Amino acid sequence: MTQEREMEKISFDWLNKLPKVELHLHLEGTLEPELMFELAQRNQVTIPFQSVEQLRAAYQFNNLQDFLDIYYQGAEVLLVAQDFYDLTWAYLLKCKEQNIIHVEPFFDPQTHTARGIPFATVLEGIERALIDGKNKLGISSKLILCFLRHLSEEDAFNTLAQAIPYLDKIRAVGLDSSEKGHPPEKFSRVFAKARQLGLLTVAHAGEEGPAGNIWTAINDLQVARVDHGVSAISDQPLMAELIKTQMPLTICPLSNTKLKVFADMSDHTILQMLADGVCVTVNSDDPAYFGGYMTENFVALVDALNLNKTQAKQLVANSINGSFVSQKSKQKMLVQLSDYR
Ligand code: ADE
Ligand code: ZN
């Protein structure tokens, strides 16, 4: 690429058409206000907001917990398998629009089983949409079951037991919800059991919590990726380890500024980590709540940090390399990426 072309600001259209892979996405976090209202009406669930506009206006968060409170409340409109299908399908249509070719979404079964909704209902609705995503839209996927870390180890074990009939539909387990006070090691035994069952592991660590949580996610939970991991930059030995092992970090820029992990996008350290050789990736986390899907996250990096095309393509290559697909599929996606100009 010439110096001149590298200097030119990347357009929305170039980023939108760039083939992309998403590795950190909560399906419940894709529930747009319009669908929330539609499902509330369909299922006769009352929500404490009068309009889509009022709901959107409430999406102002000072920290992760502020967001989680509203996010769990929003999920209460999801009751039957068709609701989980509609939620997942709407996300996949967005992926198609933004040329996201492969996704590895999270779902939080405990958010639903705690309300009396069977695990099977949740899984079947999501799974049917992911199959349609492959057949009708050409989007491949690997599903990740997340345990809610503010709940007990026993609750996580019960959830894992409910997943056993569906292990062929789930590639990995993850760990999300409130990081403060709930370190990764709380779930060491559950994750060991999940690995015995043949599942891969990932965990949110170093989002609001210290770099020590990233170490324990790696050493105790034996994760294949760290979700967020932005606090690693404060720990030089950890940075060296991440670079040496090429441990992927699934970073979510708009999430980080919405939840005040960084005060401003211009403070975000993702490109510094990329330059240091860390395997950082771009993801949308909970796009319906944080103001954008994949393309908007890349645009935010262009606007605040002057992201260039070489960096954008390296970030996608990192996602491909960090994904849970076969070597052959990775090669195919890497070729598609390098052909894109
Ligand atoms: N659940 C949904 N989004 C999350 C995030 N950013 N951190 C922790 N748990 C979450
Ligand atoms: Zn997340």
Image: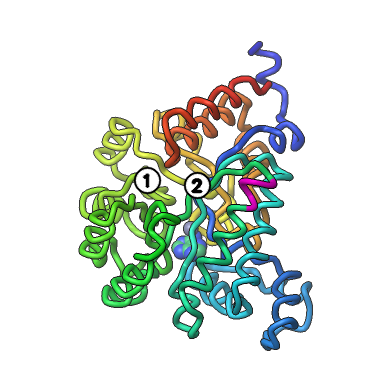
- Where is 88 relative to 282, above or below? below
Distance between the alpha carbons at the discs numbered 1 and 2: 9 Å
Mark 1 lies on residue? 225
Amino acid bearing label 2: Leu
For the stretch drawn in magenta, the main secondary structure is: helix
Foreground residue, 116 or 264?
Answer: 116
> Which label number is shown at residue 23?
2
Q: Position of residue 182 (x, y in %)?
A: 31, 69
How crowded pointer 2 is (Cα within 10 Å; few <14, some 14-19, many 20+) is rated as: many
> Which label number is shown at residue 291?
none
Amino acid bearing label 1: Arg
Is 54 colored magenta in this rendering? no
| Quadrant in the rendering for residue 79 | bottom right
Residue at 36% over, 74% down: 150
Stretch of the chain drawn in magenta = 132-136
Q: Position of residue 241 (x, y in %)?
A: 26, 36
| Quadrant in the rendering for residue 31 | bottom right
Q: Quadrant of the N terminus?
A: top right
Q: Is tag 1's residue or tag 2's residue first in the polypeptide sequence? A: 2
Asked if residue 226 lies left or right of residue 49, the reply is: left
Q: Quadrant of the C terminus?
A: top right
- Where is 175 relative to 340, above or below? below
